[in-house]
Amino acid sequence: EVVLTQSPGTLSLSPGERATLSCRTSQSASSNYLAWYQQRPGQAPRLLIYATSNRATGIPDRFSGSGSGTDFTLTISRLEPEDFAVYYCQQYGTSFLFTFGGGTKVEIK
Amino acid sequence: EVQLVESGTEVKKPGESLKISCKVSGYSFTSNWIGWVRQMPGKGLEWMAIIFPANSDIKYNPPFQGQVTISADTSITTVYLQWNSLKASDTAMYYCARHVSWSFDLWGRGTLVTVSS
């Protein structure tokens, strides 16, 4: 069973600051298989990054993803007010299984 | 417009059955896998099951195998999620989502299911 551990649980930052979110997976996987989502309160999740570093359609370039093996990072270069939300990483594993991390909440400091 | 639209809010009693739906429009229904994701109140995302509508190939997340049934009707471009006997612990928001490149690129707004006696 693949486990995705996101840290920190909560990140308190001010608008304009840089946010760095971590996702550690229990099993190494191809970088093609790691994605990031944003979920604002009361809304459905939205795909931000797929295949570790590719921005989804319409996602601003202040969002970037990196990593390999078991350690992956989502970076928001300068936080905008609409970026305060919960972020989830997700990995595709063997036997067509999808696993989500527990989430990191980015809150206004 | 490409969209996934889930059926409306449900309030059920324990032991009742339920079938919720996800209507797909704006792209070829048989081209992509469609999955269901659960979000319990105040909690994170859990992938439940996924179906390839073209041939009804299905995969379940093991904790949900036997607890729910996923299906699709290509004639009306709709994917379903069904329970035979609901439990209070099934209370959650359920999202359908389109699978592309090992991720889910398009999501519905969700169906809220409340199970309470």
Image (cartoon, coloured by chain):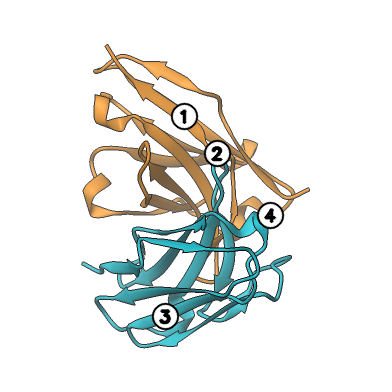
Kindly report which numbered mark, 4 or 2, lies closer to the viewer in this rendering: 2
Mark 3 surroundings: few (<14), some (14-19) or many (≥20) residues within 10 A: many
For the residue labelled by badge 4, is the local secondary structure a helix, a strand or a loop? loop
Amino acid found under the numbered disc labelled 3: Phe
Q: Can I make out residue B87 in this image?
A: no
Q: Taking A73 as reference, is B44 above or below it?
A: above
From the rendered image, report the letter of the chain displayed in orange. B
Amino acid found under the numbered disc labelled 1: Leu
Q: Which residue is mark 4?
A: B28
Q: Can I make out residue A31 in this image?
A: yes
Residue at 40%, 74% (x, y): give it.
A22
- Label 3 lies in what chain? A
Question: Which label was assigned to residue A72?
Answer: 3
For the residue labelled by badge 1, is the local secondary structure a helix, a strand or a loop? strand
Q: CA distance from mark 2 to mark 1?
A: 11 Å
Q: CA distance from mark 3 to mark 2?
A: 27 Å
- Label 4 lies in what chain? B
Residue B75 image offset from top left, x and y in percent: 63, 38
Question: Which label was assigned to residue A19?
Answer: none
| Tags 1 and 4 touching, CB below 8 Å | no
Q: Which residue is mark 1?
A: B112
Sequence order check: which comes first, mark 3 or mark 2?
Answer: 2
- Label 2 lies in what chain? A
For the residue labelled by badge 2, is the local secondary structure a helix, a strand or a loop? loop
Q: CA distance from mark 3 to mark 1?
A: 32 Å
Q: Which residue is mark 2?
A: A42
Q: CA distance from mark 4 to mark 3?
A: 33 Å
Residue at 44%, 46% (x, y): give it.
B36
Residue A44 image offset from top left, x and y in percent: 55, 46
| Left or right relative to B102: residue B46 | left
Residue B100 image offset from top left, x and y in percent: 56, 66
